[in-house]
Image (cartoon, rainbow, N blue to C red):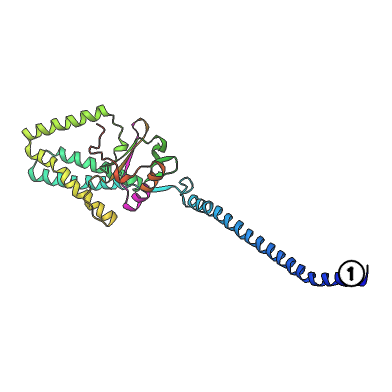
Amino acid sequence: MDDDKREKLREYLRNNRPKNRVNLGNSSNNKENSNKNLEKDLNLDNSNLDNPQISNNKTKSNKRDYDKEPLIVKNYSPLLTFIFCLISSIIAIFVILLYKDNFYHIAIFTSITLCSFLRIVNNKNNFRIFITNSQIKYIANSKTEKMIFVNNIKNIKWCIPTDTHLVEINKGVSKIIIYGGILVMIVLFIFKTFVALFILTIPIYSYFINTSFYFILNKKYSFKFYTGLIIYGKDDDMIDFLPKISDYKKIKKYFLAKKGINLDFIDTKFIPLEF
């Protein structure tokens, strides 16, 4: 190769080598930038995928496991029943002594009050509703008196706060009691008008006792008379109880989650007996 050709080749290489270095540098930078952009996109996609999963996990973690953390609600209906019986007995004794009526009325009312009082004392007013994911138990002094499986719940209603769930009375017997009561009232109106009028006042003063007790219990006044809840299970099993407002909100949340039932819109059971 002659000198002219060598010189031209050196000049060509000299002129093109820097450009190649710049291009190589730019291409490597471009590759680095593109890789960084790809990593950002991948991280963004992963974060978008993870967010719903994280929110779902948070939602699941916020859901209460009632087997690990049961909902325990105190039942105040036995205490209300005792107060009602006590006041009824005092009024009855006063009226009977005032009008010198038969003393066997005193014995009847006193016996009812005594039985109610003994139940309160024996159980130390320790009446609880124990609610888990699958069961609802009525417990007195750590002893299960009634149990209903959640899957077997047929209905939930408002009711008069009493201990009717402890009395096993079928519908036939209930009809006899109701019709018999109506007949007795008719006879009393004919022969003992004052006694009949006295009996008719029972719902009136029981309403005042109920509303007063509700105010003392919840520090809030309500005109509702049917403040208890009754749960119907399989084979006419039932559990009724009187909760505080704070407990009622927890129970409402439970049934919304488990059964899709809003307790604010359930029906009312007007008569304590099955009819």
Residue 210 in sight from this viewpoint: yes
Does 1 sit above or below residue 256? Answer: below
Quarter of the figure that contains the C terminus: top left
Q: Which stretch did the figure color magenta?
A: 236-251
Residue 126 in sight from this viewpoint: no
> Which residue is disc 1 drawn over?
5
Residue at (34% x, 53% y) in the render: 246
Q: 259 or 87, which is in the foreground?
A: 259
Residue at (66% x, 64% y) in the render: 33
Picture coordinates of residue 65, whole percent (x, y): 47, 47
Mark 1 lies on a secondary structure that is helix
Residue type at mark 1: give it.
Answer: Lys
Residue at (60% x, 58% y) in the render: 41
State which quadrant residue 77 falls in: top left
Quarter of the figure that contains the N terminus: bottom right
Q: In the image, is residue 33 part of the stretch drawn in magenta?
A: no
